[in-house]
Structure formats: C-alpha cells, structure tokens
Amino acid sequence: MYKEIEGIIIKEIPYGETSKIIHVYSDLGVISIMCKGAKALKSPFRATTLKFTYAKFNIRYKENKLSTLVSVDVINNFQNIMQDIILLSYVNYLTELTSQVIKQTGENLFSDYINTIIKINEGLDPVIMCNILEIKYLDYLGVGLNLDSCICGSKTEIVTIDGDRGGYICKKCYQNEFIVEPKTIELLRMYYYVDIKSISKLKISNKVKEEINHFLNIYYDRYTGLYLKSKHFLKKLID
C-alpha cells in the first residue's frame, strides 16, 4: 500500500554499503523506512534523507514493519538550525526528550514538537521555545505543574516558584526561597496554555527567561526521573 506521510527524520541507521534506514516521526508515530541506495553519490535520496529533514515521504507502507521509500518532497531542511551548533543541540535535546515521553506514554506529540523546531529555525529564542515544550510535556510525564495555586492549595499571595518544592509558593509557605519576578510567575501559565504554532514574536527579559529556565531544570531533575545525554551536552555547551 502506497502512503504519503508528513514527518521529520529523527534517526538514520546505515544499512549495507549504500542504503540506510530512517526513522520518521509523524502524526502516525515513528515509522521506519528503508532508503535503498540513499548513501550513493548519485542517489536523489542522499540529500533528502538527512537527520532533521522535514518532508512529505511517499512510501510503500507496511504497518508495524519496515516500509520502503519511493520519493521525498522536502518541506524544510532547517538550514538555520543545521548551521548553528547551539540550535542543533537544542533540537537534539528536544528530540530525545520527545522520544522518551512517547516511549513512556504512547502519546503523539508531533504537532507541538515540529512547530517548536519550526519556530527555533525562524529565529525565536531556543531557550524559551524549549521551556514551552518542556512545560507542556510535564502532564504526559505525570508530574504536571499546578498553575492555579500554591503547593499548599492556596490561590492567594503567591510570592515565588521553587523547583525543589514543586511549584508556586505562597506567603504562608515561604521559607527563604529565591524571590522571582512577578512576570516569571505569570509567564509560566502562558507557556503552558500558548498555542506554539501561533507564536510570532517573544518579548521576555533575560532575567525572567533565566528564572523560568532555572526552575524547569531543577523541576525536571527532581520530578521526572529523566537523564538525557543531550541535555547534559547542551548544559556544558552553553554554560
């Protein structure tokens, strides 16, 4: 059965001397596709089956088996990302994170994932875009943030957030935690509810951006149980 799927290559595996297998993430989940002769110098697939190529793939589809590539119509090769080691490292991290969430939950997260990469390629801040996706993934990981009240349940006098304690902290629960900007508390909710595809520009101060990123780094380390090599590499790269 022939099928056209829209997706992004998240993994390449060499196969023999001239072929390879690609893993394409799409609305159908992750599909494994044999690309015969794709490594050959004169193959039309050589340049269109590289990692992080976003395209329409025409395949001979075999459900739960290895499909075969027929043709590729590239939508976006994410040139800006591929030319920047930092942006590429963010996308590698988001890809590994997304793969882990899929593995644990079976959820299809393709729309938010691909739109985040598109926005990063268009020049939007990778830290902010990464944080937005991280917040959205917390629910799937079973450790979603309570964005309506303090960790004690109070909805009044929220003074800060704390990753170790797990969320918003009200005046009564405050125990000398670092006091973040009021905008930081406000934007956490915006990050969660925003439609990624609709984002066109971001005006967030460096201080607020850093506070949100710091909070999420601690929260992920403490509550998700995930250790991702790509995140460790990214931290070393940007520190």
Image (cartoon, rainbow, N blue to C red):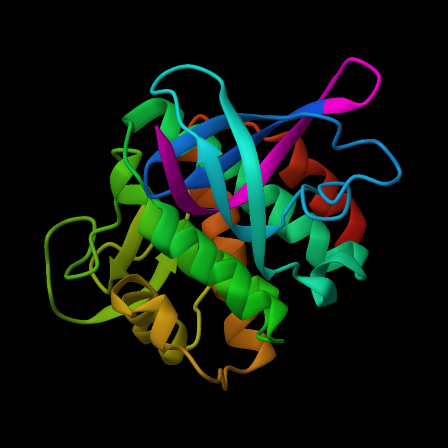
170 left or right of 232? left
Q: Residue at x 81, y 61 (%)?
A: 83
Q: Residue at x 47, y 34 (%)?
A: 59
Q: Quadrant of the C terminus?
A: bottom right
Visible residue check, residue 119: yes
Looking at the picture, how far across and down is residue 89, in whole percent? 70, 49
Q: Quadrant of residue 139?
A: top left
107 left or right of 199? left
203 left or right of 34? left
Depth check, front residue: 32 or 2: 2
- In the depicted structure, whether residue 117 falls above or below residue 89: below
Visible residue check, residue 239: no
Residue 183 in the magenta stretch? The answer is no
Depth check, front residue: 180 or 111: 111
Depth check, front residue: 107 or 20: 20
Q: Quadrant of residue 69?
A: top right
Look at the image and give the residue range highlighted in magenta: 1-19
Magenta segment's dominant SS is: strand
Looking at the picture, how far across and down is residue 17, in whole percent? 84, 17
Residue 4 in the magenta stretch? The answer is yes
Q: Residue at x 79, y 61 (%)?
A: 84
236 left or right of 179? right
Q: Quadrant of the N terminus?
A: top left
- In the depicted structure, whether residue 222 falls above or below residue 217: above
Number of numbered discs visible in the structure rendering:
0
Q: Residue at x 19, y 56 (%)?
A: 150
- In the depicted structure, whether residue 89 falls above or below residue 39: below
Depth check, front residue: 38 or 236: 38
Looking at the picture, how far across and down is residue 236, in whole percent? 78, 44
